[in-house]
Image (cartoon, rainbow, N blue to C red):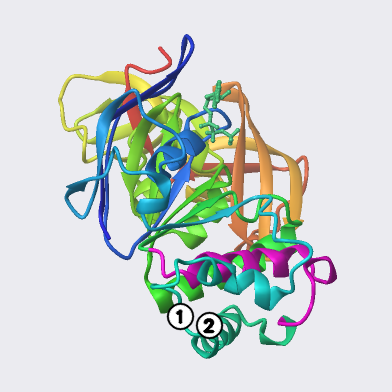
Amino acid sequence: MSIHIEQISKRFGQFQALNQINLQLNTGELTALLGPSGSGKTTLLRIIAGLEQADSGLIRFNQQDISQQHVSERGVGFVFQHYALFKHMTVFENVAYGLTVKPKKLRPSKADIAKKVHNLLELVQLGWTADRYPAQLSGGQRQRIALARALAVEPKMLLLDEPFGALDAKVRAELRRWLRRLHDEIHVTSVFVTHDQEEALEVADRIVVMNQGQIEQHGTPEQVYDHPANPFVYEFLGNVNLFHARVNQGQTHIGKAAMPAPEHSSAAEQAGLAYVRPHEIDVFNQPQTDAIPVTIDLITVVGPTVRLEVQATELAQLVHIELPKAQFNTLNLVTGAPAWIRPRYSKVFLGEGI
Ligand code: ATP
C-alpha cells in the first residue's frame, strides 16, 4: 500500500510539532523516520496510524483519503518500544489474539488460527516458544513475538516506533538484520521510527531525515549518506570534519590541498564550509606539495579500522580520519610524528561559516 502525506501540520499548544509535511512512501518499502529527539517522528507515525489527528493536511492510502478513518479501519499493525504482550497469555495466545477477537463472521476457524500462528512463529524463528509466557522470553524474543502478533491480522502497513530501543546493542544489531531479512520476505509497506542513524542506514530502503517538524531529506541510504542535502543531514548521518574552503573553477581549496568540485564551476572565487567524512581523507607519511601538514595526536584501533586525530596547525584545527587497518600498517605512523593529509572529496556549502 502506498502512503501519500500532504501538507500535514500539528501543533501542541504553541509548539509546532509538524510543519507542512509532504511525503510519499512507496508500496512494499521499508522507510525509516530518522531524526533527533523531538523532531516529530513519533507524531508523524501516530498521525499515519490514526492515533493522533493532524491540525491540517491529508493522508491517502493507495490514493484514497483516509484522514477521517478511525485507527481500527486503517489496517495498520504496530510494534512499539515497550510493546506489552499480554503477560497472562502464552506466546501462541498472544499471536492469535487479533484473530480471536474478530467478529464471528470474519473469524477464521480454530484450526486455521492455529496454522497461521504456527506459520508466523516460524517466520519470526520462534516456533519453539508457543507454550511459553512472555516473562520466559528475552527482550529481543518478545519484540519478535510482538511483530508476529502485529502481522497476524495481515496489516496493509506495519508501523514500528523505536522497536529495538529498549534492547542492548548486540541484540539490537541482530534484530536489525533480522528485520531486514523478514521484510525482504513479506514486503509489507513499513515505517519505523529511529534516532539511530546506523540503524536507519542498515535497515531501511528509504530514509526520511526529520528536524524540528520538517523533512530535511528523503532518499535512499546511499543518497542521504553520500549526498546529504544540507549541513544538518551531513552532521546527523555520521562524523564529519568541517573546514573553511575556497572554491573556484571547479576546484575546492582547503589550506594547501585542492580537490575537484564539479558542482561549483564559477570562475569567481567563493568561500564556504567544506564537509569531509573521516574516511574520505588520504594520509601520507612523506611531504606532498598539495597536502596539508599535520601532527598525529592520537591513534585508536577499532577492529579493522584505525581512527586518527591529527592537528592541522596551519588550519588551527583538529581533523578526524578513519583508515582501514591494512592501509594504516603500510604508513608506519606514530603519535607525535608529522604526516600529510588530503581530502579526496568534500561537499562545500557556499556562504556557510564565513
Ligand atoms: P523522540 O525520539 O524523543 O520520541 P520524536 O522525534 O519522536 O522524538 P515526537 O514524539 O513526535 O518527537 O514529539 C515532537 C514534539 O512534540 C516534542 O517536543 C514533544 O514534546 C511534543 N509533543 C508530542 N506529543 C505531545 C503531546 N501529546 N502534548 C504536548 N506535546 C507533545
- State yes or no: residue 298 in magenta: no
Q: Is residue 334 visible?
A: yes
Decide if residue 253 is on the left or right side of residue 153: left
Pointer 2 with pointer 1, Cβ within 8 A: yes
Q: How crowded is mark 1: few (under 14 residues within 10 Å), some or many (20 or more)?
A: some
Task: State the separation of the CA atoms marked 2 and 1.
Answer: 6 Å
Kind of residue at disc 2: Ile
Is 321 or 30 nearer to us in this picture?
30
What residue do we see at 48% from left, 42% from top? 34
Q: Which mark is residue 108?
A: 1
Residue located farthest toward the top when viewing the structure as drawn? 14
Residue 119: % across, % down:
54, 86
Q: Position of residue 59 (x, y in %)?
A: 27, 40
Q: In this view, does 229 lie above or below 207?
A: above
Residue drawn where x is 52% and y is 64% of the image: 150
Residue found at the very far right of the displayed protein: 136
| Residue 43, label in figure | none
Residue type of the residue flagged with mark 1? Pro
Quadrant in the picture for the N terminus: bottom left
The residue at which mark 2 appears reads as 113
- The part of the chain drawn in magenta is 130-155
SS for callout 1: loop
Regarding ligand 1, which quadrant of the image does it lie in?
top right
Q: Position of residue 351 (x, y in %)?
A: 32, 16
